Amino acid sequence: MTHDHDVKQVLLLAAEADRPDPEPLADLVRARAAASARFRRRLRFCLAGTAVATVLGVASATLLTDSAGPPQAAESAQVQLVAEPFDASPYTFDLTPTGWSVQGQRPQAVTIAPDDGSTSSHPDDYRGKLVIMLDGHAPQGRVIDHEGRRFWLSVSSGYTTIATWTRADEPHGVVRIQFPDDAGWDEQSMVSFLASVHVGPGARPGLG
Amino acid sequence: MRDNERSAEFVTFTSNHRSDLVRTAALLCAGDEAFAEDVVQATLTRLYLSWSRVRRAASQLAYARTTLTHVFFDEMRRAHRRRETVVADHAPDGVTENDDIELRDVVLAALATLGPRQRAVVVLRHWHDLDVAETARILQCSTGTVKSQNARALAHLRDVLGALDDPIDLEVPR
């Protein structure tokens, strides 16, 4: 017996599969890292010139200093970290940032927002908030050693991301926190906060 | 455009259309899900880096599908070695001997035996319903090439599916 199928039917059947629902923020974090890397590449290209490049180098170095450094807290109150644990399963934290609260809590990502109402109340709107995620991509950026662990700092327009490998007793991967600039987080507080994160077994990579 | 604005639009686009891109990539990659995910991730990154062009596109999804096809070819060139391994996993010779293999696997195995370009023609013409001219534009070839590649690819799929123990007669739209 012969069954009739048109090509589209057959392709539809072939294209369907049970796939995990990926976290859009993971795509965004990756895309931002690529944008940041492209910016640095272009900057290096500029700096490779001669006399003109020297002038460009000064301007670019200033720009790099502005963008690669930690967020300046001049316009925002400095975030205070207190030694008070809190739970945002599957993540737990040894330090609590005063004035910030957990807003979104999923196996793929935790969102922490400032209490001042300056950001959206929708947990999927990450603008101006901290996003904590797990993934399997090697961390990139400037290396920072802190309390025996290695951290990587990378920047893209408006955000700084700190990443580190999970501990031996945690799900294997890279845990990252994306911090908005101008929200009162300096480099030390960002690294300390990430160092206080414990990744529970329920954490799932933001990627499918 | 402010970065926040671009990022918000990107997340919205990804939420709405990522699954569509994954399905297309799965067909182009003949069921190699890991490869398809790589292609989709590379595509989304490329879209983010040129978001101003995505915004100006008459159809953002169509623009993304075109980008996906180009990324697929780029990745095929880069991952040639890996692709050969995967294709071997889907070799259709033994397919008809195994009664338990589902039609999906048979179709993917048949797609895997097509060349990347023929596969792309089939996907663009019959999955996305693009006409010959648009397919040729995306693949940067002549309309004659699209027609001949399409005819060969469909003939091959008909042969494979028609040779099953429980044969399938593949209807080809005129």
Image (cartoon, helix red, strand yellow):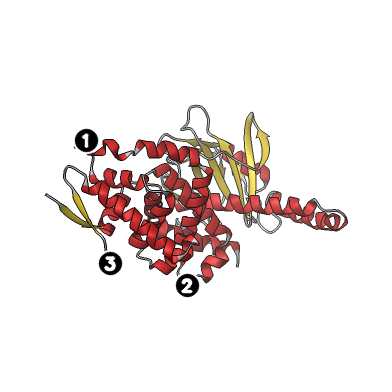
Outermost residue, left direction? Answer: A1
Residue A90, horizontal then vertical, whole percent: 43, 39
- Asked whether B149 or A196 is in front, the reply is B149
- Residue at 35%, 55% (x, y): give it: B152
SS label for mark 1:
helix
**Chain on which label 1 sits:** B
Where residue B174 is drawn, which disc sits there?
3
**Residue A17, can we see it?**
yes
C-alpha gap between disc 3 and disc 1: 32 Å
**Chain on which label 2 sits:** B
| Neighbours of disc 3 within 10 Å: few (<14), some (14-19), many (20+) | few
Residue B88, horizontal then vertical, whole percent: 38, 36
Describe residue B31's horizontal placement relative to residue A51 as left or right.
Answer: left
**Chain on which label 3 sits:** B
Q: Earlier in the sequence, mark 3 or mark 2?
A: 2
C-alpha gap between disc 3 and disc 2: 28 Å
Question: On the same chain: label 1 and label 2?
Answer: yes
Q: Is residue A58 above or below residue A107?
A: below
C-alpha gap between disc 1 and disc 2: 48 Å
Numbered marks: total: 3
User: Which of labels 3 and 2 is toward the front?
Assistant: 3
Outermost residue, right direction? Answer: A51
Residue designated by label 1: B97
- Residue at 44%, 35% (x, y): give it: A200
- Asked whether A164 or A2 is in front, the reply is A2
Q: Is residue A11 above or below residue A87?
A: below
Residue type at mark 2: give it: Ala
